[in-house]
Image (spheres, grey):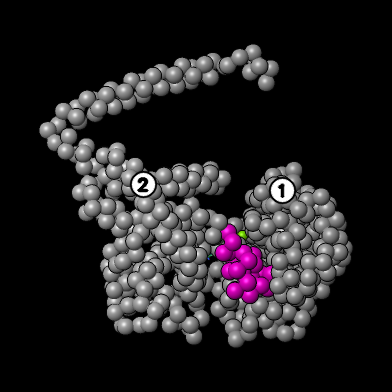
Amino acid sequence: MKLQVKNVHKSFGHTKVLNGISLDVAEGEMTCLIGASGSGKSTLLRCINLLEPVDDGEIWLDGAEIADPALDPQPIRQRIGIVFQSFNLFPHMTAEENVMLAPRRIFKTSRDALRPTVEELFDRFGLKDRMHHYPDQLSGGQQQRVAIVRALAMKPEIMLFDEITSALDPELVNEVLQVLKSLKQDGMTMVLATHEMAFARDVADKVCFLDKGSILEQGTPADIFSNPRQERTRDFLARVLGPR
Amino acid sequence: MSDSNKGPTRRQAHERKLKRRSMILAAISTSVVVAALVILIPLTPGWERVKQSFFNWDIVVRTFPKLLNAFLLDVAIFAWSVPLIAALGLAIALARDVRDPVFYPLRLFGILYTDIFRGVPVVLVVYLIGFGIPGLGLQRPFNSPYLWGTVALVLTYAAYVAEIFRSGIESIHASQRNAALSLGMSPSDTMRFVILPQAIRRVVPAQMNILIALQKDVALLSFIGPVEIFRQAGVFKSLLASFTPYVVAAAIFLVVTIPATRLADHMLAKQNRARS
Ligand SMILES: Nc1ncnc2c1ncn2[C@@H]1O[C@H](COP(=O)(O)OP(=O)(O)O)[C@@H](O)[C@H]1O
Ligand SMILES: [Mg+2]
């Protein structure tokens, strides 16, 4: 398994947000987390990336435990890319500088040495003519693609995506989802929290339904979307997909 | 679009009418007030004396060159204080944000520093340091009140500047920090390349207001020695038995501070517009 989450618990103050989550993600697989707002999807992704410390439980990446509070999180975060709903580009830097900052500082690579790889990434995601623009000169869809490129430039082993299309105008959603499909073809291991049910059904290898901090049900998209076993899963799907 | 080429829209015409009316009203009321002042003030019993003492044109002409010259010392003190204040203020602001327990003393120092220097009137700091340290009997040039007076200003203003930097740092949304950390960047690189550049930009107008206050407070050094403009005006006052040199000094300050204040306000307004 590329990533294993084992019985993870997390509270904010007295609010229990993750209640014994266990999840296996195989190399090259796309796992979609679905569930109502507030069910803990973002918190789970932030815990995997070590932006939030877990209270209890273990997280294993490539056969090594990473959530041990005694470990230095920095080198681990370099191996795990995350993209947020609100893009979070650095507004005072051009798209290219946004992408180059972390590799420059962490790997001590020069701009010139980075440029070919970075240009290739921009080109691949249709951003070649936007490299020298500032974030506020880009559309939401372009900003989100730059954010993905920024995470990819660190050559992560696994990518996490937290509702990356939720802040986009509807006509811009597709260009970002295309990027995810293309990454999947590369064999990238991905975990994404999403409300794009049609996308999850068509592209995901595995779908997990989160409810109040627990994974209530998981399986193939066919299992979850066509044969949900749990009452609450059926309720949730009926609410987001409408009556069928 | 085609409509607007034909002339002002109905709303534009209406707004133009309102604007013309309010301008006429403002002009009338201003003229009335100014006329009243010009006519009434000279009627007061003490006016002749005040005029002689504060607005004596001969004395203006005689003292202006030397006062302007003395003002250059204010400008010089100001100019070499600013980079020191900026550097020290930033260092104190960063010291107060250190989380590592090893550096707790640094943090404590930052807190004490800002509390003390913001809590004591500038003039007291100038007195205590400006008279106190030269009183230790140090050798030239370390006995110069000019030097220690400037140090007093730097120490005091660094405390205010530090607080503004800190408010700027805190105003940067946590998501920026998270984005940098999630890429694997170190906390110090995150501060240096992501948080600080945004924070500093954001507080430039507020820092400009502090600099304007500093420009005025340089005159406090006159109490401990350097013959800057306020001190020079005092010399002229004793010599000529007139307050006019003080008015000249005030006017010289205003020529610098009014444009600077306008610039700061303008930058702040621009920033507020950009953010909303
Ligand atoms: N930093 C935080 N402090 C306190 N409560 C939080 C914090 N982050 C998330 N929560 C709470 O945790 C719960 C799960 O949130 P989240 O993981 O964002 O859910 P989702 O992404 O599925 O909408 C919510 O009730 C939310 O209010
Ligand atoms: Mg969320």
Q: Residue at 64% x, 55% y: name it.
A: A91
Q: Residues within 10 Å of mark 1 (few under 14, many from 20)?
A: some
Please give left or right for residue B241 compared with residue A74 in the image: left
The quadrant in which residue B161 appears is bottom left
- Give the number of callouts: 2
Residue A46 seen from this side: no
Residue with the most extreme left position: B45
Between residues A133 and A179, which one lies in front from this camera angle?
A133
Between residues A70 and B233, which one lies in front from this camera angle?
B233
Magenta stretch, overall SS: helix
Residue B196 is one of the magenta-drawn residues:
yes
The Cα–Cα distance between marks 2 and 1, rounded to whole angstroms, is 55 Å
Q: Position of residue A116 (x, y in %)?
A: 86, 64
Q: Residues within 10 Å of mark 2 (few under 14, many from 20)?
A: some
Say above or below: B162 vs A142: below
Residue B64's tag is: 2
The amino acid marked with disc number 1 is Leu
- According to the picture, the residue beneath numbered tag 1 turns out to be A138
Asked if the residue under mark 1 is in contact with the one under mark 2, i.e. CB atoms within 8 Å, the reply is: no
